[in-house]
Each structure stands twice: as C-alpha cells, then as structure tokens.
Amino acid sequence: MMSPQEARCLKELAEAYPDDECSILTFAGITERSGLSAREVRPAIHELARLGYVRRAAIFGSDGRLAGSGYIATRLGLVASERGVARA
C-alpha cells in the first residue's frame, strides 16, 4: 500500500508530465508543489523509485552542461496515478 506522502509525490510528478513531454522535478520542486516537507518528500520519492513508479533523470542547462538531477514519473507511475492507485 502506498503511503499518503508517496501518493502525493507521485500525483505531482504525473501532473508535471504534459502531453507526453518529459518534465523533471527536483526534490525542492516536488516539495513546493506537494505542500509536503522535505523530510516527507525524500523517503517517499526513494520508495517510489524502488517500486519503479519514478526514476532519476539528469537536468541539463541551455549550454548542454549537467545542471543537476531530479525525478520523473515512469509509464508505470503514470498508469498508477491515472488508475487511482495513488490517491493524495
């Protein structure tokens, strides 16, 4: 069973996935969008990644250099979110 924090994080990542275009959110972005604390977001995201609902992704700047990393919803995570497996 998914925790409420995991469900909220997955919902935010799924909603940040517009029209089949990849949207990467950092921990700070997920925290801001979800209203959860960083202490709640980090373990929730790590568990979602372990389950295959989200994955880590690189963020590149306009100059093509690595600028950081964040997380995106996987197809499995999008389906889970659409089917209501993740209820926030």
Image (cartoon, rainbow, N blue to C red):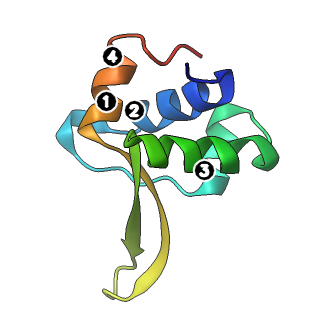
Q: Position of residue 25 (x, y in %)?
A: 49, 52
Q: Amino acid at mark 3?
A: Gly
* Residue located beneath label 2 in the image: 14
Q: Is residue 52 left or right of residue 50?
A: left
Label 4: few (<14), some (14–19) or many (≥20) C-alpha neighbours in 10 Å? some
5, 31: nearer the viewer: 5
Residue in the image at 65% along x and 33% along y? 34
* Residue located beneath label 1 in the image: 78
In the figure, 21 relative to 8: above or below?
below
- Spatial separation of the CA atoms under disc 2 and disc 3: 13 Å
Q: Image quadrant of residue 20?
A: top left
* Residue located beneath label 4 in the image: 82
60, 71: nearer the viewer: 71
51, 45: nearer the viewer: 51
Q: Are marks 4 and 1 in contact (CB under 8 Å)?
A: yes
Residue in the image at 35% along x and 22% along y? 80
* Residue located beneath label 3 in the image: 29
What secondary structure is marked by label 4? Answer: helix
Residue farthest toward the left in the current orientation of the protein: 20
